Image (tube, helix red, strand yellow):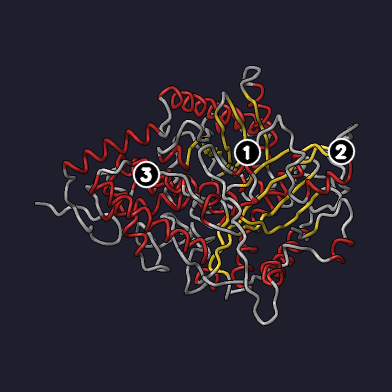
Amino acid sequence: MAAERQWGVTPAFSSDPPSAGDLKLNDLLVSELKAQNNFAPASDTEKREAIITKLKGLLRQMVQTVGKKKGLPQDILDVAGGEVYTYGSYRLGVYGPASDVDTLMVAPKHVTRDDFFDLMPDLLRQSTAPGEITNLVPVPGISTPIIKLTIRGVDIDLIFSSLQLSSLSDKVDLADDSILRGLDEVDRRCVNGTRVTNRILQLVPQTKTFRLALRAIKLWAQKRAIYGNIVGFPGGVAYAILVARVCQLYPKAVAPLLVQRFFFIIQRWNWPKPVFLQHKEESSLQLREWDPNTYRGDAAHLMPILTPAVPSMNTAHTVTRSTKTVMMREFKRAEEIIKDIYDTGKPWSTLFERHDFFTRRYKHYICVNTAAKDQNAHDAWAGLVQSRIKRLMAGIEGSDANSVELVQPFTKGFDRVHLCNGEQQLEKTLDGSLEFQVKATETVATDGHADVKAQIAQSDTDGVEVLATNGEANVKKEDGPQRVYTMTYYIGIGLREGATALDISTPVQNFQGECTAWPGYDADMHSIRIKHIRSYDLPADVFVPGETKPVRPKRKPKATTNGASPADNKRSFSNSGLDEATASAKRRQSANTTNGTEG
């Protein structure tokens, strides 16, 4: 009998087939995922496929147009071609009804990225009926240039790469490392999204089982608010690699057992030992790869989860000490729930219960309030601030180690719109008040494509009108109330047992300084305020129906010690530097000041 194939870098832990109990739990898991609206209907899939086919036709039309403009012979144009690939959740087969489609256009070398941004937006508009495209935003001046569009209700993230090939008439094998030769960093980054996704699918024993297990893990991570690279948690690719590794260790298991073993193994993994799906591939290409022996920054990574395509990189490089601690806590909770699902028939829905970040997890929160008078300017500003939240977290972790146990960011910001009459209302809004929020609008908890917003803010914004240097771009001169756009990011502060004081004024001030040092920052346009609030002061719109907002505890008489009054003890948390701003700091602030820490 031929030896069974080894998947991954080590032998399997078990090659046992699923039991009858596993199969029954598998059916129940599928039913629960359907109840959670986790699967896209067949009609949605057909619509997405039709859109991808349309995009391929537009790409080939663009390739021909550019070639003729540059005087290429017809015999070369006849075979020039152009191909469209997908990556991310759509390519992995774990997309839902509201998922976007990450799409890569690949063209021969005579078509440049500038050609793509010059021609593709108009091609898209001209090829669709009125109303089919409801959003089209080219964003060329960022690290991964992109066109974001919504066509027939489907969100498309469209990126582009020009390969050093004259012809792409047949499907190019993107797995061939030689296609990376001669590409700049941007083109390599664009191509590698598809390369990594394809390779993951090739390295799992059972694609269908992998997809079901990954759907469950992604849903769990999103529900528990531990999903998103930009705030220090694994993103979709990182979770896919972790699930794929568990699949390799249990090649014949069905999804419920894979989910159970996922929580058991990843919780006990010998971090920072890296997780990888294959042995390192030798390549003649001189490309920087993850290497803790060579690069000090790589050696500092806490949870290396490596991509299985050259160049191999850590997909979880943003994980911090605190976010890792939060993940380990959630892995432990999930493992206990899975045990009950197996042992006592507990329903799968208990695994996917909503997080308790706002309801009972923390007593103290830091609110980072960003604001601007124009929505486009605010999008970039809020993205910039969110991209640097990890620095604030690191500063808080290190500033008061005797008091702070961990610092957990919430994975989404809260978008709000306000109308302010006069400077007093504006000042209150900039400070976080919801008193003047537009009632016809809802607070939206969203990542707001935060990765793109952050890239815009940190790039040179070439070709992107984000704001004017004089602070007046896109600000409509309105008679009456001033419209103000805000985003609030919440950070939970876990204190050590017995902690009675907290001083984080220095990291807060440093963080504000870093943000306002952004070249695009304009004091007349942007605002950032940082406050400390207690759980019972959280606004109502961070809770969903059925959740109970924390209530203010009743005061208990305090005995004085060494002549200290109860009021003196109460001020212990004011030492955070956030509960009260000094009188001098207040005097420095004007109505339009954007730099303050009050509470």
Q: CA distance from mark 1 to mark 2?
A: 23 Å
Which mark is first along the chain, 2 or 3? 3
Residue found at x 37% / y 58%: 332
Amino acid type at circle 1 is Val
In this rendering, the answer to whether 432 lies above or below 281 is: above
Q: Can you tell which mark lies on residue 444?
A: 1
> Badge 1 local density, few (<14 within 10 Å), some, or many (20+)?
some
Q: CA distance from mark 3 to mark 1?
A: 25 Å
In this rendering, the answer to whether 221 lies above or below 585 is: above
- For the C terminus, give its image quadrant: bottom right
Which mark is first along the chain, 1 or 3? 3
Q: Can you tell which mark lies on residue 421?
A: 2
CB atoms of marks 3 and 2 within 8 Å: no
Q: Position of residue 82 (x, y in %)?
A: 53, 34
Q: Quadrant of residue 122?
A: top right
Q: Can you tell which mark lies on residue 350?
A: 3
Q: Secondary structure at mark 1?
A: strand
> Badge 3 local density, few (<14 within 10 Å), some, or many (20+)?
some
